[in-house]
């Protein structure tokens, strides 16, 4: 986006581009990329549409009264702007009276309606656009409109036309003619069209000549009279020759041959010749030396200026201005136009006179302050814009003021300032009374306090004190003459008297308090030895005490004469008695607890030898125990007299009974696991010799076993039973019987297998019998 500063510089250089749209933003709308543009509100800037100037009689008269150089200046700005568009390859294509705005007071113009234009890809490019016929269009554009009107099927259908840079040159030439004369260069035609302009050129006419034989000559006698009279005379005698030549060049040679039309650079050259730098006729002010607040009025008369500046402030269109000047200043009027710049200066000075302070005083004699009464300050000053008292504030609109008296020596300064910054000062020096107050007396009604109900009375007699205070938490006593005090310890009281101005005087009084302790007449208990946890009663009789308290977390008992205390151990109880003044007396009682342990009457087990995993039961009978525990996992059994336990090994159980005062009794019993192995009553085989391939059985009977197991793949078996076996080889069978705790008995059975003899080719080979020593007879 172009910055405002950059845009301002551009529009200053190309005044005619003030109506050009400016890029404002880039964004998205409904998912599509969009760009935004904005343009100046020309009406708000003092511009009028040129069409309105031509049609509004009052605006037309105002415009026509402009001198020719002013009109040519506007033309110069238009040509300069179109030359810029030509340089960037942009064709306006729709330049007309509605597309031109003119500022009559500033002699400025602004071109609008850039939306129907086209950007050229090359100098020979002829892009297509759409438009409507209007009298500033070039002849070749009129011809395209005529063709388009004849060929279109719908009357509302827009007509496309091809445009180029040369077609804009015709429109600009028509505009310049309008600016000078306020009507079309061919105003004397009955119609402005391609055919009328072609007939004009083919007839050998040279602009602005015409004859009665011209077929498109207007029938309006008033227009013909205007052409033959004022217009022709003014064109030939009043217009600069260079401008006439360019009109003739464009409207004659360039009518049907666009390349012969006057270029923008040619127009700039001839229009520049008609212009000159601004002229400052006068620049003056109503006063060059300022002595008051009234503004300076500057006024001027300038000819042929497009921009006027007073000290760089834009005053274009104005003839005077009001200025508030506070210091010596040089005013510079600058007048500018595209053809030069002139300036004129005026020096304005301000008064250097200082305000006059005739007096500045107080109502205090010799400015010596002895009281806290308010002070009145007054003054007389002339030639001022502002008056202030330093540290107090602005008093411009006052003749006097009241202030609180200062607490120390101080200088007050009155400063008066003129409208132009010149200052005058006057000071008053105040001195304060530095003498301290007088403490005539400070005393106590008694020297020693024996009873808190009979306090000491402090009294004093002091002069010239603004404030009085006493330490030891008494505080401010400014408006008092006496006060009662009851210190809890020996104390020194200091009275401090301070004057209004901070001077201090002090005096002291020493007070003593009684050191007599209270009397503990009795401190007793109903029991000094306790056999169990119980409450005892403590009682006492004390005189002369403000506070009574007992240790062992009993605390304050000032309002009591007895209290109950629960004894859980040997303890020493001490009663403390304290007076109001902190003097103490104390007395102690020792309480003893019983050291007799609990009685364990019995501690037994339901079994002392355990043969399996079934729990056994422990029982006991104990007197005077606060806590009972059994080890080996039984734990706290204070609230019961029996406990089931599971035995896995030889275990000694110890019961421990503790009295409420910590005395201990113990007793133990031992429970053992059975170490007797099971009894194998029998384990045998039906046959100890077994022919190969035959079956026999094993039988057994066991007592007191937790588990019975036979090896060689038989596994666990019941306590007694029988099982068939058919071993393939000689085998020893072992029966293992275990009790719950792993103690075992074993028994074996050996079984011999008798092998069958092997056959050899269907016969049996017998071994020879051994020779008997004693043959059978």
Image: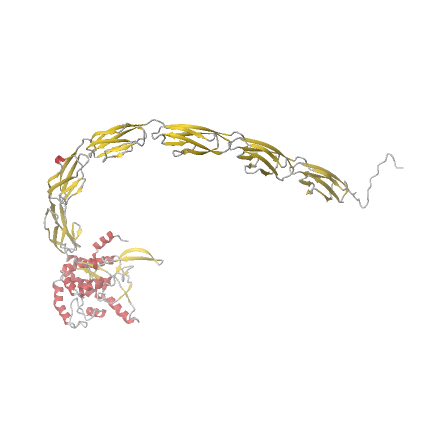
In the image, taking residue 591 as reference, residue 145 lies left or right, namely left
Whole-percent x, y for residue 711 in the image? 69, 40
Q: Residue furthest top?
A: 515
> Which quadrant of the view contains residue 40?
bottom left
Whole-percent x, y for residue 301 in the image? 11, 54
In the image, taking residue 450 as reference, residue 244 lies left or right, namely left
Whole-percent x, y for residue 747 in the image? 72, 37
Quarter of the image where the C terminus is located? top right
Depth check, front residue: 110 or 378: 378
Colour scheme? secondary structure
Depth check, front residue: 582 or 710: 582
Q: Does residue 354 show up?
A: no
- Give the mark count: 0
Relative to residue 538, is residue 263 depicted above or below? below
Q: Residue furthest right?
A: 777
Depth check, front residue: 189 or 288: 288
> Which quadrant of the view contains residue 195?
bottom left
Depth check, front residue: 697 or 387: 387
> Which quadrant of the view contains residue 682?
top right
Whole-percent x, y for residue 587 in the image? 41, 28
Q: Does residue 642 show up?
A: yes
């Amino acid at each position: 986006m172009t910055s405002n500063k950059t845009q301002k510089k551009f529009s200053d250089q190309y005044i005619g581009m003030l109506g050009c749209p400016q890029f404002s933003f880039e964004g998205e709308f409904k998912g599509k990329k969009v760009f935004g543009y904005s343009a100046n509100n020309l009406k708000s800037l003092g511009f009028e549409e040129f069409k309105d100037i031509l049609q509004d009689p009052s605006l037309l008269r105002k415009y026509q009264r402009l001198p020719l150089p002013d009109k040519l200046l506007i033309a110069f700005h238009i040509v300069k702007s179109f030359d810029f568009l030509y340089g960037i390859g942009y064709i306006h294509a729709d330049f007309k009276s509605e597309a031109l705005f003119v500022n009559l007071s500033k002699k400025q113009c602004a071109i609008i309606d850039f939306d129907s234009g086209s950007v050229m890809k090359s100098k020979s490019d002829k892009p297509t656009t759409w438009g409507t016929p209007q009298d500033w269009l070039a002849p070749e554009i009129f011809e395209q409109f005529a063709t388009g009107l004849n060929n279109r099927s719908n009357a509302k259908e827009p007509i496309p036309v091809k445009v180029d840079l040369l077609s804009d040159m015709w429109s600009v030439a028509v505009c310049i003619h309008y600016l000078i004369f306020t009507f079309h260069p061919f105003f004397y035609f009955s119609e402005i069209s391609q055919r009328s302009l072609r007939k004009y050129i083919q007839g050998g006419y040279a602009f602005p000549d015409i004859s009665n034989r011209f077929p498109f000559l207007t029938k309006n006698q008033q227009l013909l009279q205007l052409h033959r009279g004022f217009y022709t005379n003014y064109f030939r005698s009043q217009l600069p020759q260079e401008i006439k030549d360019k009109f003739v060049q464009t409207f004659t040679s360039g009518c049907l041959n666009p390349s012969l039309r006057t270029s923008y650079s040619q127009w700039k050259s001839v229009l520049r010749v008609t212009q000159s730098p601004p002229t400052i006729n006068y620049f003056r002010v109503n006063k060059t030396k300022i002595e008051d607040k009234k503004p300076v009025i500057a006024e001027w008369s300038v000819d042929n200026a497009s921009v006027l500046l007073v000290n760089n402030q834009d005053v274009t269109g104005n003839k005077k201005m009001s200025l508030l000047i506070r210091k010596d200043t040089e005013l510079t009027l600058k007048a500018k136009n595209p053809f030069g710049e002139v300036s004129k200066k005026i020096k304005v000075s301000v008064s250097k006179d200082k305000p006059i302070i005739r007096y500045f005083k107080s109502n205090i004699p010799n400015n010596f302050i002895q009281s806290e009464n308010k002070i009145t300050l007054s003054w007389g000053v002339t030639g001022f814009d502002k008056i202030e008292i330093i540290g107090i504030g602005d008093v411009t609109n006052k003749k006097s003021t009241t202030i609180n008296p200062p607490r120390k020596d101080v200088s007050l300064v009155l400063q008066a300032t003129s409208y132009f910054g010149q200052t005058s000062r006057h000071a008053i020096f105040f001195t304060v009374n530095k003498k301290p107050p007088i403490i005539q007396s400070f005393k106590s009604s008694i020297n020693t306090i024996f009873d808190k109900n009979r306090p000491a009375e402090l009294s004093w007699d002091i002069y010239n004190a603004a404030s009085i205070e006493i330490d030891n938490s008494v505080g401010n006593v400014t408006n008092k003459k006496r006060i009662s005090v009851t210190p809890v310890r020996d104390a020194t009281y200091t009275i401090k008297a301070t004057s209004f101005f901070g001077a201090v005087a002090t005096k002291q009084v020493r007070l003593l308090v009684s050191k007599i302790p209270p009397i503990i007449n009795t401190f007793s208990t109903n029991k000094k030895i306790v056999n169990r946890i119980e409450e005892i009663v403590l009682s006492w009789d004390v005189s002369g005490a403000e506070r009574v308290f007992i240790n062992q977390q009993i605390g304050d008992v000032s309002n009591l004469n007895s209290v109950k205390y629960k004894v859980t151990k040997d303890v020493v109880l001490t009663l403390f008695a304290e007076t109001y003044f902190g003097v103490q007396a104390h007395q102690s009682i020792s309480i003893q607890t019983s050291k007799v342990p609990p009685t364990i009457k019995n501690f037994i087990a339901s079994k002392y030898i355990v043969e399996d995993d079934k729990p056994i039961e422990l029982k006991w009978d104990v007197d005077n125990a606060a806590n009972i525990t059994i080890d080996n996992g039984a734990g706290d059994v204070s609230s019961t007299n029996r406990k089931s336990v599971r035995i896995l090994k030889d275990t000694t159980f110890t019961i421990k009974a503790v009295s409420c005062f910590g005395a201990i009794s113990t007793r133990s019993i031992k429970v053992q696991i059975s170490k007797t192995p099971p009894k194998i009553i029998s384990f045998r085989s039906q046959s100890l010799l077994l022919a190969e391939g035959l079956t026999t059985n094993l039988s057994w009977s066991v007592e007191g076993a937790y588990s019975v197991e036979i090896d060689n793949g038989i596994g666990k078996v019941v306590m007694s039973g029988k099982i068939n076996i058919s071993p393939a080889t000689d085998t020893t069978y072992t029966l293992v019987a275990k009790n719950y705790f792993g103690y075992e008995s074993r028994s074996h059975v050996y079984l011999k297998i008798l092998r069958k003899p092997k056959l050899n080719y269907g016969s049996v080979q017998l071994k020879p019998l051994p020779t008997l020593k004693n043959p059978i007879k």
